[in-house]
Structure formats: structure tokens, C-alpha cells
Amino acid sequence: MKKIVIIICACLSFVLGLMIFGYAAEPVSKTSAEGLPAPPSISAKQAILIEGETGEVLYEKNADEKGYPASTTKIMTALVVLDLCRQYDISIKEKVKIPKEAVGVEGSSLYLKAGETKTIEELLYGVMLRSGNDGATALAAVMGGNTEHFVRLMNEKAEALGCTGTHFVNPSGLSDEEHYTTARDLSTIARCAMENKTFRKVVKTKTWKEYTNKNKTVFQYEGATGIKIGFTKQAGRTLVASAKRQGVELICVVLSDGNWFNDAYSLMDYGFEVKGCNDER
């Protein structure tokens, strides 16, 4: 009995000593073994954070796992449209006639009317800021000759960029089991799109004529440069966000994420800390 009492007292003394010196309740370290900040915990099913200029991966979570892009699909739609404009020397000020197939498309809408004319620029802003599915369909039909051919161009572009887990079946992102991507592929597509000055200008814009950007990143996050949100029941909430500070631009992708904006901001905060950037642009 005396031995047991001695052992208990020794244990209590040891624990008391740890508490006095602040070890017993030591918090989980916020830095890695290498001294770098620890990445945040996020709720996205798939995610990735890259440096825009180099493509360096700063964080990833199930980045090669199949996911659904929803309206972040329109990043590729706009990219292909701008590629075609450059290839055929077409100005974005060019007026085009809205085809019947673009009228009444399910989901977010620009409320286009068959036969009315819009410039390519108007449709691009409507697609990227307002996320108009009818606008995306109109651009695909007009610029590709028909929607099917345009979607083929989207898939060819994805393949040319080295995307191995992506397949598109429409230009808007409406739900389809065969319309999918990965966080890594989507970051690759976004990185390419952001190299286009017109694309970059459009997605950074807060308001343009009657359109207000649905991507709250450009209103809320310091140094934000774009780019696109998406949502369907199948995909959940998807977001590709970008920001630039002290010459470093980050691109963040979160898929199937109920906490999409906060998670993207946390990841970009982490990325800028890793890169040694403060809150200045």
C-alpha cells in the first residue's frame, strides 16, 4: 500500500511539473517540422493551391480525384472563345446573333432572346460575371459553328494542356455524369486562362453594365484577381479563386465545398505566408 501511495505521488508531481512549465496543455503546432506554416483544415472534398506563374503546388487534397466543376466549366468556355477570336482575328466587339438553342437554358440566365444581337464581349461578361448558361450556349453555338463542335474544342484544349481527368459535355457546367474534372486539371485550365489579358480583365471586374460579379472573392479578398464560382446539386459549391500580392499570384480550387470562400481564403492566406508575402498587393 505504501508503494502505491509513493507511485501516485510521483505521478502527480510529474504532471504538476509539466503544467508549471507549460507543457501539459501545449497547443498543436502551427508550423511544420521544416518551420513552415501548417496548412489549414478545409471541408472541400477536392482542392489544390498553386502558384500561378510557375505552377508550383503549395497544397493539395484529393487533387486527382474525380469531381464536378459546375459553372467553373465556363473558364474553359471563355478560354476557347478567346482562342478562336485570336485564331480567326475576330474582335470581341463583333456582334453576333443569338441562336434559338441558347434561349431558355436551365439555370443562371442572361435572359437572351432568339435573333437579338450581342457583342462577344457582352456575352463574355455575362457568362463570367453573371454565370449565364444561355450566354455560354450562345457563345458555343456561334463560335464553334454548333455546340457539339465547340465542346469538342473544349476537350481538345483540356487534352493539350495535359489534363487527364477532365471531360466536358456542355459549355455551361450543367450536371451530367460524363461532365467532370479534377482540382488539379481545373487549376491548370485556370492558370492558362489567366495568361490571356482579356480573360484576366473580365474575371477581375466587380461590375460591368448590368452585371455584378458573383465571385465574392473580388470584393472580399485583398489582392483578388478572379476567377469563377459554380454550383449544382451534383457538384455542390465549387470555386476557383485567385489573388496577387508582392508579385506572387496564387490560384486556388475547391470542389464540393460548403465553406467554399472561407476555405479558399484560408488556403491563399497560407500560400502567401509560405511565399513570405504580407497583405500588401
Image (cartoon, grey):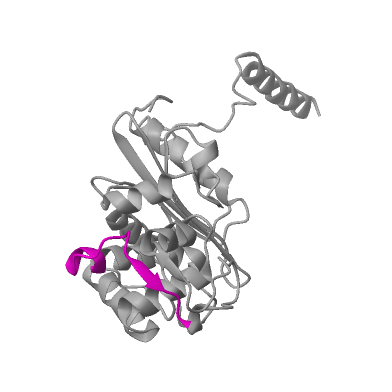
Q: Position of residue 230 (x, y in %)?
A: 53, 61
Left or right: residue 173 compared with residue 237: left
Q: Nearer the viewer, residue 158 or 171?
A: 171
- Count the numbered circles shown: 0
Q: Position of residue 239 (x, y in %)?
A: 50, 55
Q: What's the residue at 34%, 53% (across, down)? A: 199
Left or right: residue 161 compared with residue 6: left
Q: What's the residue at 56%, 62% (across, down)? A: 256
Q: What's the residue at 50%, 43% (across, down)? A: 206
Q: Nearer the viewer, residue 8 or 130?
A: 130
Q: Position of residue 260 (x, y in %)?
A: 57, 51
Query: Which residue, as the protein is rendered here, is positioned at the far right?
Result: 1
Q: Position of residue 177 (x, y in %)?
A: 51, 82
- Is residue 135 depicted above or below 35 in this figure? below
Judge whether residue 92 is colored magenta: yes
Judge whether residue 70 is colored magenta: no
Q: What's the residue at 55%, 52% (across, down)? A: 210
Query: Which residue, as the protein is rendered here, is positioned at the far top?
Result: 20
Q: Which residues are magenta?
A: 84-99
- Is residue 99 depicted above or below 12 in this figure? below
> Residue 156's image quarter?
bottom left
- Quarter of the image with the C terminus is top left
- Quarter of the image with the N terminus is top right
Left or right: residue 187 compared with residue 115: left
